[in-house]
């Protein structure tokens, strides 16, 4: 099974999630509108988490690579 890339960038999902929270906190919505927004917020939070997990994995891989001793001989500079 291949991992699908989220349809939104992290920034897009975060910004939309912020808007959803703001709208929910403002109130004045029907129950159905509130539920729909809440469901969208849950989906957006999941997208953000996917991006953050991917970033953590990339960072961990880069740090592990950096921590490994250099096994290739360094090229000497010509004199």
Image: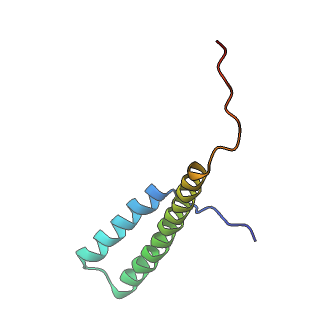
Q: Position of residue 17 (x, y in %)?
A: 39, 67
Describe the colour scheme in one phrase. rainbow
Relative placement, left or right, of 41 versus 58 is left
Q: Position of residue 77 (x, y in %)?
A: 64, 19
Q: Residue furthest bottom?
A: 31
The residue that appears at 42% across and 74% down in the rendered structure is: 41
Q: Nearer the viewer, residue 10 or 23?
A: 10
Q: Residue furthest top?
A: 79
Q: Nearer the viewer, residue 63 or 26?
A: 63
Relative height, residue 47 to residue 63 (above, below): below
Q: Residue furthest right?
A: 1
Figure quadrant of residue 61: bottom right
Q: Nearer the viewer, residue 74 or 16?
A: 74
Tally of marks: 0
Relative placement, left or right, of 60 versus 26 is right
Picture quarter with the C terminus: top right
Relative height, residue 41 to residue 76 (above, below): below
The residue that appears at 36% across and 70% down in the rendered structure is: 20
Figure quadrant of residue 18: bottom left
The residue that appears at 46% across and 74% down in the rendered structure is: 40
Picture quarter with the N terminus: bottom right
The residue that appears at 61% across and 51% down in the rendered structure is: 68
Relative height, residue 70 to residue 47 (above, below): above
Figure quadrant of residue 24: bottom left
Q: Position of residue 47 (x, y in %)?
A: 51, 67
Relative placement, left or right, of 52 versus 78 is left
């Amino acid at each position: 099974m291949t991992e699908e890339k989220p349809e939104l960038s992290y920034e897009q999902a975060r910004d939309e999630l912020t808007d959803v929270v703001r709208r929910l906190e403002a109130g004045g919505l029907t129950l159905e509108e509130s539920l729909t927004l809440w469901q969208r917020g849950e989906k957006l939070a999941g997208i953000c988490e996917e991006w953050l997990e991917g970033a953590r994995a990339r960072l961990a891989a880069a740090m592990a690579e950096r921590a490994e001793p250099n096994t290739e001989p360094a090229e000497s500079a010509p004199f």
